[in-house]
Image (cartoon, rainbow, N blue to C red):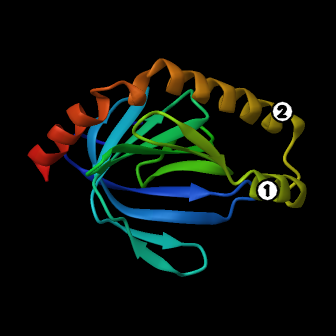
């Protein structure tokens, strides 16, 4: 299947393990779309929650999705530097309708000085019981959390010093 073309806009859909829709980002501009990774940008985009609540993002963001990594990274461009929000979840699937992934609750917030906090561990434990996450999913997510922390420490991939700035400049070209 073809991947979204540079310069087009797509939706991003996240789901929960039980198949229910979790969240929809209405509009993300594709900056690069390949079978390996998708990089997008958005600014003040509408987000719809499964419970019907809507909200709008507050700042420009560069989104990084990889077809083999069990996480995705959103680099938010703020006055005091780049802040990152990392979702642990399945690698992306592009089905021609939207970029889709399963969100597994655990998140990591990374600050401009590259310090970070692991978030939503209680939500993860609750959903793991409620939705009966298989042992292999739990093991994959624990491995992924360690891998993500390593990427942060190494400033690898989307955490490299110029990654977000490079893609943000490209985003401004199209925006």
Number of numbered discs present? 2
In which image quadrant can residue 1 be found?
A: top left
Residue 83 screen position, x and y as percent: 40, 45
Which of these two is toward me, 104 or 98?
104
Which of these two is toward me, 137 or 77?
77
Q: Is residue 29 left or right of residue 147?
A: left
Identify whether 111 is placed above or below 166: below
Q: Is residue 3 left or right of residue 70?
A: left
Residue behind mark 2: 136
The kind of secondary structure element at disc 2 is: helix
Residue 99 screen position, x and y as percent: 45, 49
Q: Is residue 3 visible?
A: no
| Residue drawn at the location 44% of the way across and 22% of the way down | 155
In which image quadrant can residue 164 be found?
A: top left
Instruction: For marks 1 and 2, give the CA distance.
Output: 19 Å
Q: Is residue 65 visible?
A: yes
| Residue drawn at the location 70% of the way across and 59% of the way down | 19
Identify whether 47 is placed above or below 15: below
| Dots 1, 2 in contact, CB < 8 A | no
| Residue drawn at the location 47% of the way across and 33% of the way down | 114
Q: Is residue 170 left or right of residue 24?
A: left
Residue behind mark 1: 122
């Amino acid at each position: 299947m073809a991947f979204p073309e540079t310069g087009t806009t797509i939706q991003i859909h996240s789901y929960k393990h039980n198949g229910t829709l979790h969240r929809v980002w209405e509009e993300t501009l594709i900056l690069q779309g390949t079978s390996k990774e998708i990089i997008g940008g958005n600014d003040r985009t509408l987000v719809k929650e499964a419970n019907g609540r809507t909200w709008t993002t507050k700042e420009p963001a560069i989104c990084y999705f990889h077809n083999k990594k069990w996480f995705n990274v959103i680099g938010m461009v703020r006055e005091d530097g780049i802040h990152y929000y990392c979702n642990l979840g399945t690698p992306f699937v592009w089905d021609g309708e939207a970029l889709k992934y399963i969100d597994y609750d655990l998140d990591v917030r990374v600050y401009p000085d590259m310090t970070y906090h692991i978030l939503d561990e209680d939500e993860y434990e609750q959903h793991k019981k409620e939705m009966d996450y298989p042992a292999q999913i739990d093991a994959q997510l624990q491995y992924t959390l360690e891998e993500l922390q390593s990427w942060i420490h190494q400033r690898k991939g989307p955490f490299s010093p110029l990654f977000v700035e490079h893609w943000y400049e490209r985003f401004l070209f199209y925006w």
